[in-house]
Amino acid sequence: MKINLINPNTCTGMTEKIAESARAVALTTTDIIASSPSDGPESIESAFDEAIASAALLDVIQAGEAAQVDAHIIACFGDPALDAAREIATVPVIGIAGAAFQLASLISYRFGIVTTMTRTLPASEHLLHRYGYQHLCSGVRATDIAVLDLEETNDDIYLELKLECEKSIQSDGAEAIVLGCAGMSDLVARLSEDLQVSVIDGVAAAVKLAESLHQLGLKTCKIGQYGAPLTKAFHGRYQHWDNCSTTLKK
Amino acid sequence: MKINLINPNTCTGMTEKIAESARAVALTTTDIIASSPSDGPESIESAFDEAIASAALLDVIQAGEAAQVDAHIIACFGDPALDAAREIATVPVIGIAGAAFQLASLISYRFGIVTTMTRTLPASEHLLHRYGYQHLCSGVRATDIAVLDLEETNDDIYLELKLECEKSIQSDGAEAIVLGCAGMSDLVARLSEDLQVSVIDGVAAAVKLAESLHQLGLKTCKIGQYGAPLTKAFHGRYQHWDNCSTTLKK
Amino acid sequence: MKINLINPNTCTGMTEKIAESARAVALTTTDIIASSPSDGPESIESAFDEAIASAALLDVIQAGEAAQVDAHIIACFGDPALDAAREIATVPVIGIAGAAFQLASLISYRFGIVTTMTRTLPASEHLLHRYGYQHLCSGVRATDIAVLDLEETNDDIYLELKLECEKSIQSDGAEAIVLGCAGMSDLVARLSEDLQVSVIDGVAAAVKLAESLHQLGLKTCKIGQYGAPLTKAFHGRYQHWDNCSTTLKK
Amino acid sequence: MKINLINPNTCTGMTEKIAESARAVALTTTDIIASSPSDGPESIESAFDEAIASAALLDVIQAGEAAQVDAHIIACFGDPALDAAREIATVPVIGIAGAAFQLASLISYRFGIVTTMTRTLPASEHLLHRYGYQHLCSGVRATDIAVLDLEETNDDIYLELKLECEKSIQSDGAEAIVLGCAGMSDLVARLSEDLQVSVIDGVAAAVKLAESLHQLGLKTCKIGQYGAPLTKAFHGRYQHWDNCSTTLKK
Amino acid sequence: MKINLINPNTCTGMTEKIAESARAVALTTTDIIASSPSDGPESIESAFDEAIASAALLDVIQAGEAAQVDAHIIACFGDPALDAAREIATVPVIGIAGAAFQLASLISYRFGIVTTMTRTLPASEHLLHRYGYQHLCSGVRATDIAVLDLEETNDDIYLELKLECEKSIQSDGAEAIVLGCAGMSDLVARLSEDLQVSVIDGVAAAVKLAESLHQLGLKTCKIGQYGAPLTKAFHGRYQHWDNCSTTLKK
Amino acid sequence: MKINLINPNTCTGMTEKIAESARAVALTTTDIIASSPSDGPESIESAFDEAIASAALLDVIQAGEAAQVDAHIIACFGDPALDAAREIATVPVIGIAGAAFQLASLISYRFGIVTTMTRTLPASEHLLHRYGYQHLCSGVRATDIAVLDLEETNDDIYLELKLECEKSIQSDGAEAIVLGCAGMSDLVARLSEDLQVSVIDGVAAAVKLAESLHQLGLKTCKIGQYGAPLTKAFHGRYQHWDNCSTTLKK
């Protein structure tokens, strides 16, 4: 199968890192095609960044559809533009936060989330609510590590991250840790070993769920809420969507 | 005061209609500046449309900030990009759905919502949840009138709309009606008279709330969640935000 | 327009103070008529006080209706007897807590409440629940300042109040402060300046909302829950309501 | 033990009926003292009626305290003034709605409520929320029988009531019926027999709970929320509470 | 009346203690028949223990039914197998946690729970949710006293328990204490005296509720969810239930 | 990997059917070991059945642990004994209802559940609540097909099932269907084709999730709530657990 692995940030270093993490856990029959939009912010750390990145990300979904991929993964912990992407996709679209919550809930009673900037805490709360996992989460903790600093992680960053994970376990009662940024995916093994609890990376989780859906022949339901949007006029920099008949419904 | 009244749809006919409704209720000292983005879909009727329109709408917010307006109103019932807009605004940003809910709750025990496409029902439910008004709403009803058909309303459309309002009152127990599209704002007076209950238009409600905040000197709080986003690199069609120092925080 | 501004406490000093705060923000065309009931407790600081004050307050609503006011404001942070008042009123009835929550939510992501006695904390929680603003409130803090001590505020009281506001901002994450007593309305300007965040007084907020509703021609919906109560026999000290046909429905 | 059984309506016919129902289920050692306030509405059918009745009812609580009763029962399905009464009482205060919910939940998975006027439905919903029994209730149905018509029940009224009980069982899935008015307490036996399901009368339930608490030596906790209100000045028709030191705390 | 008082733990020392506590509060006409299953764990301190004990406990319910008891009490704070027991019982089945919550809510605004092992905290949370008392509970505290150590309580254990009760009152705002283990029932009097707040033992509460239901003639509703299970084949160690026609429905 | 696929009903016909469904979707490297307990009811259709089956099922979990399986699947839609099983397991334990909800939520906005007996509806509601998927479910429908009738499905049963699926889609707005019994797993393909929407079988879903967890090296977290229960004395028919040191913690 082919997975369209999308880094909605325009920083290409992170795209490479995420691709590597995905390939490390994918089946040998799974082809990981990693990319990021040409347009938009280098990193997503506010509602403003997310709004811009969301519009840009949809181009990559459409490109994936054109390339006949079997699933899309949105590899940013905010799961941006998920509903919009599902509307224009025929195959499954999986957000890494939702994927991580699902697997974490199968192996722990309460999981903790350790994420990047304090500013993004409400986004995590919103995700927990959206997916219905609030009661299964022991708390969300911010490290105040900037997303771009995760492109090349060093020991200082690792130690800060580990410290918040330890607090999550000891103070909040977390039994497993969900990492709140795709850029942390290369630290999973080291953290798991040091913390002696399960550490869940959403990129890896999403890859396995994409493979699972593909093997079961399950695709995005195109009746109801995720049906294709009506074709209509789009202006200016979004003219490529104008009366677009590939993924939109006439 | 100056109000930046934004129609996030790119259909200019609706911009005119909304401006008129706003001016009809504004104080004489209030200057209504109505516009719509140059980019984006003609109408917002899906999560996909909303994602594109959200990115485009932020340009209009920034233009309004540059023009030193005293408040922004997002005149689309989905209240798209509200949090993102508040991050880059220094003055209040008001969504018409939230505004309508607030005023409706002051004069009725339970209000009903009558909106456009069936497809948008989950959006209304999401708004009720976001603002915390679920328990004060007797139900949401769709008319399946397309947004663009509201640019020029005729008798057929009026009757369809009235019919759903009557069902909302008689079957759902609505004591007041909130209209679920800015494009319905010219029908408020006729509906109020025919239905004999209060009919609330979010555009009018938002204008009064914008004036209220202005008179009290209340502006968007710039600490915490609505603080300015960090300046950073933006690429491609969003390059105008690149290291933007007007509204973003260095 | 004429606003019936009601201090449900029988302490007249506070009535004067509240009237002044209201007039300071009212439009020049708005006439503030401030009064308090002749009967009832000097201050409301318990469910018992509130039950007595509620019955007394309804007389002032009826007097306002007789005087053909255009709106009633219940200027006590518990919003006592709000539903009962709406039943016997034809024009809008606004509680200052609800009004403050509405405006605070338009300019902040999370607001804090700073109120009087610890004993009243459950009342604030009940109000947040009733109006649906729990998720938008970062927490409620009591100062243990008695209501009557707010009739004439001194520096000590100001400093105690400011201290709790600072804790609300720094510890609870409040981005704006809602003051939890009508008697604090004269301290808004000083607090706003010292705290550098928006401070919202419910009296001022309610005045602006009353003006907004009046300008839009919106009145209390008299079908359903806020319809006039049936006329019936009332005995003893409530005989003035006996088969009362002014505001009650035959 | 002595129970102060209070009919908060001023209609004395209902007081007699309720007393009889209470005595029919009380232990031989329990003395039922039934009364109603001298002041207030003949029946409680709106928030307005309830606000007036609440202030009046507190006099009867105080009289009961003076007479050294061992428990108070508020025999109106709205459980009016319950928190205020608990503040000025030293012994337990039990509302009949809460009492009925408790016993109904011990013998059924889902109980239905059949009450008087449509207008009172929100009151029942509020009670279910307050006590936390929403998820255990299959629905609330109104008969539109006026409270005063229950003073002397005839066959027509019985049949209307039975009809709604049957709908509650067959359409809503009720497994037991809670009667939503103290005035229905004389119909319990006949309904139970005709419906072949358990029918729960709040008056009887409250008597048994009052006896239970008394036998266990449990009284209203006077620390925290139900502590005595502070003594303070009361004016006009509430002057009997002025600096009252019997039940209020100096 | 005859009450089937069941200690679902197989430790017989606790059965004796519980019987004594029950008899101390029962009416003279109430016959307490205390027993525990022959099969199962000595104490219930995990979901695993509870699953085993639940299956065993149902034999004791059936024995009680055969002995024509008038009520069953499940005397373990987890209220294990409550729904299953109600399905095979014709008379009321009461869990001691639910019973304690009911009486505590009648005399306090917020009650605290003090229980045994930290491991059982989620069980208490689940019970509060199941019965709908979450908002009436100020918090749950574990003492980490093992259940079997409560068979013979000494001063050390008493002091540990008292310490957590004090924290519940002072830090959490508890106004009354619910004891979270049947094995603590002999300490109620001493704790009540030392703490000066009401202390509620579920065993005593359940006895009074069982008597109340019996006196009102209320039994488990056998239509709907608590109807008798269908008779069917049971194998192996559960063969005594095979096509059992005593309590199961053909 | 080896999966311990457990049919908690003692009807062996269904065990065979479930094994086949599991093998049809499993990777070639996955070994499905299907079994059912020797003890317990032939089918689970009530809380009573579930309580008995839960205790029996734990023996099969322990046998699986002894056989060093890599995951356990509880193949009954009630997900019985899930927490207890996780306590005594070192590898993941997955319930088929939870697994189906997870995959359904990845491809639809709202899924419907079509299950067996009306009597089991509360069980489905409980599962939705437990996992937090209530808001993602459009409704639960019962077919009143007995579990044992699913051992060998005929056309009549298929048509009844299809009818309820159609109602779920057309009346409730389901966009995908979750089948509410492991015994329906052989009908997935036929239903999917006839209904033209995705139909999700929990057995298949659970197999893919078990494989996913295994490939990521994720196991049940043994700190906190799912830690091994303390070893202790077990009596009678549960003596095989007495001071058991294999899976229990000393």
Image (spheres, coloured by chain):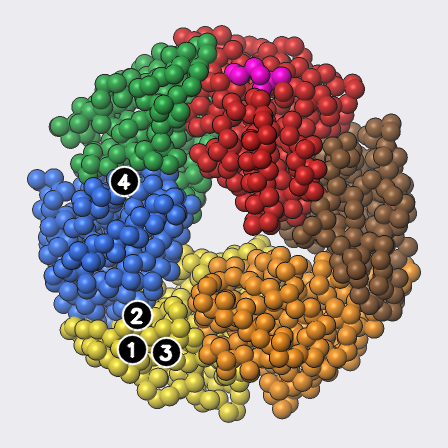
Chain colours: A orange, B brown, C red, D green, E blue, F yellow
C240 drawn magenta:
no
- In the rendered view, would you say A205 is above or below D102? below
Residue at 67% x, 23% y is C21
Q: Main secondary structure of the magenta part?
A: helix
Q: Tell me the distance, in whole angstroms, between the alpha carbons under discs 3 and 2.
A: 11 Å
The reply to whether label 4 and label 3 mark residues of one chain is no
**Could you tell me the amino acid type at mark 4?**
Val
C86 relative position to F40: left or right: right
- Return the residue at label 4: E197
- In the rendered view, would you say A101 is above or below D43? below
Q: Residues within 10 Å of mark 3 (few under 14, many from 20)?
A: many
- Return the residue at label 3: F89
Seen from the viewer's position, the closer of residues C68 and D14 is: C68
Q: Tell me the distance, in whole angstroms, between the alpha carbons under discs 1 and 2.
A: 10 Å
Q: Tell me the distance, in whole angstroms, between the alpha carbons under discs 1 and 4.
A: 39 Å
Res E48 label: 2
How many dots with numbers? 4
**Could you tell me the amino acid type at mark 3?**
Ala
Seen from the viewer's position, the closer of residues F174 and B93 is: B93
The reply to whether label 1 and label 2 mark residues of one chain is no
The reply to whether label 3 and label 2 mark residues of one chain is no
Tell which tag, 1 or 2, sits nearer the viewer: 1
CB atoms at circles 1 and 2 under 8 Å apart? Answer: yes
- To which quarter of the image does residue D65 belong? top left
Residue at 77% x, 23% y is C27
Determine whether the residue tagged by mark 3 lies in a helix, strand or loop.
loop
Q: Tell me the chain of label 2.
A: E
